[in-house]
Amino acid sequence: MNKSKIISDGKEVISTELKGIKKLNKTIDYNFDKAVKTLSKVKGRVIVTGVGKSGHVASKISSTMSSTGTPSQYCSPTDMSHGDMGVISKKDAIIVISNSGNSNELTNLINFSKKHNIPMIGISSNSDSELIKASNISLILPSATEACSIGLAPTTSTTMALIIGDALCVALMKLKKFKMSDYKKLHPGGFLGIQMLQVKDIMHSKNKMPVVLENASMKSVLIEMTKKSFGHVGVKNKKNQLIGIITDGDLRRNLNNKFFDLKAKMIMTPKPKLIEKDLLVVDALNTMNKNKITCLFVVNTDEKKLPIGIIHIHDCLRYVN
C-alpha cells in the first residue's frame, strides 16, 4: 500500500467520525439538561460502567469526572455481578454506556438500580433497548457509520460516547462553578500541577518584599536592595500604594557626587508593571519576557496598587523549565 493511500484512509476515518459527531451535536436536548442537573445533586459518587470498548470509554469519563469536581468510580458490570455491586450506595447515581443497550452483563446492574431506586443514566444508540427502557434519563447516540473498514468495530460509536461523557463533565463543572483553584487541589503533582501554579504560590511576601517609602534616602534604598537580593526595590507612597520601582541599573545611572542627597522618588521608574496574585506563573514569565524585566510586584485583584509580594524570573524558571 503506497503512502498516499494510507494518508487517504486515515482522513476517511476522521471524516466518517466527524459526521457522527455533527449528528451527536443535534441530539443535545432537555434530557442532557436533566442528566447534568441530576448528577450535580448526587451526594455520593457517580458510578460509570460499560462492557468491552464502552467500558474503556466509561473508565475515561469517570476519571475526567473525578478530576473536575464530581466524585466518580468506574466498575465493570461483570465484576459488579460477582460481588462488586457493593460499591454502589443509595447516594450514588449510575451512568451505563452500551451501544446496543442489550448486553447480558448489564441485566444484574439494571435490576439492582431499580430495586434500590438509584438514578440511572443510559447512553446508547438503541432507543428500544433494555438499558434505555430501564433508565431514568436516556441519552441516545444517533445512528452513524462506524469508521472501520468492515463497518463493525466500535469506532464512531465509541467516539460519540466519549464526547457525550466529556460534555457531561464540562457542563457539570460550569454548573458547580468549579474553578482553577479547585482543579489545582486535585492535581498537586506532575506537569499539570506545575502548569497550574499561580503567582501567589511562589511569590515572596511580607518582610521579604524589598520596599521603601517615596522619601527614603539612597542609603535606605541601598540597604533594602542589598538585604533582599532582588536587584529591585519598590517605592510606596503614604497610602502604601506602589508608585514606582528602582533597579540596580537605576542606582548606577544616578551615581554622582550628590547621589546620597537624592530621595527614592527622584530616581524611580513610575508606573511599574504589576501582576495579579491569581494569575499563572507562566503568565508572569511571559510578562517579564515581553517587557524585558526580571521582577514583578504582586497585587490583589481588587487592590491593584497595594503590593503583597514580589516574583523573580528565576522563581518562574525553577518551575516552568
Image (tube, rainbow, N blue to C red):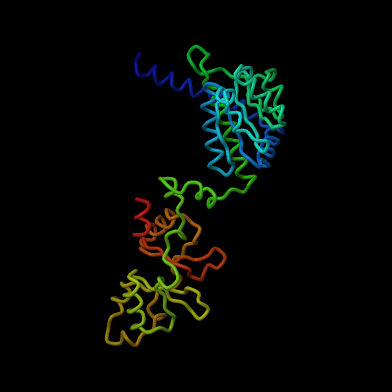
In the image shown, does 35 or 89 lie closer to the viewer? Answer: 89
Q: Is 145 drawn above or below residue 269 in the view shown?
A: above
Q: Looking at this rendering, what residue extends furthest in the top direction?
A: 150
Q: Quadrant of the N terminus?
A: top left
Residue 179 horizontal side relative to residue 139, left or right = left
Residue in view at x 46 percent, y 56 percent: 198
Q: Is 214 drawn above or below residue 64 in the view shown?
A: below
Q: Is residue 16 visible?
A: no
In the image shown, does 227 or 221 lie closer to the viewer? Answer: 227
Q: Is 128 drawn above or below residue 222 in the view shown?
A: above
Q: Is 106 drawn above or below residue 202 in the view shown?
A: above
Residue 161 placed where, x, y %?
Answer: 57, 27
Residue 18 horizontal side relative to residue 221, left or right = right
Residue 116 placed where, x, y %?
Answer: 71, 30
In the image shown, does 282 or 267 lie closer to the viewer? Answer: 282
Residue in view at x 65 percent, y 27 percent: 122
Residue 53 placed where, x, y %?
Answer: 52, 22
Residue 2 horizontal side relative to residue 71, left or right = left
Residue 306 placed where, x, y %?
Answer: 51, 71
| Number of marks in the rendered image | 0
Quarter assignment of residue 162: top right
Q: Is residue 167 visible?
A: yes
Q: Looking at this rendering, what residue extends furthest in the front direction?
A: 83
Residue in view at x 35 percent, y 19 percent: 3
In the image shown, does 125 or 239 lie closer to the viewer? Answer: 125
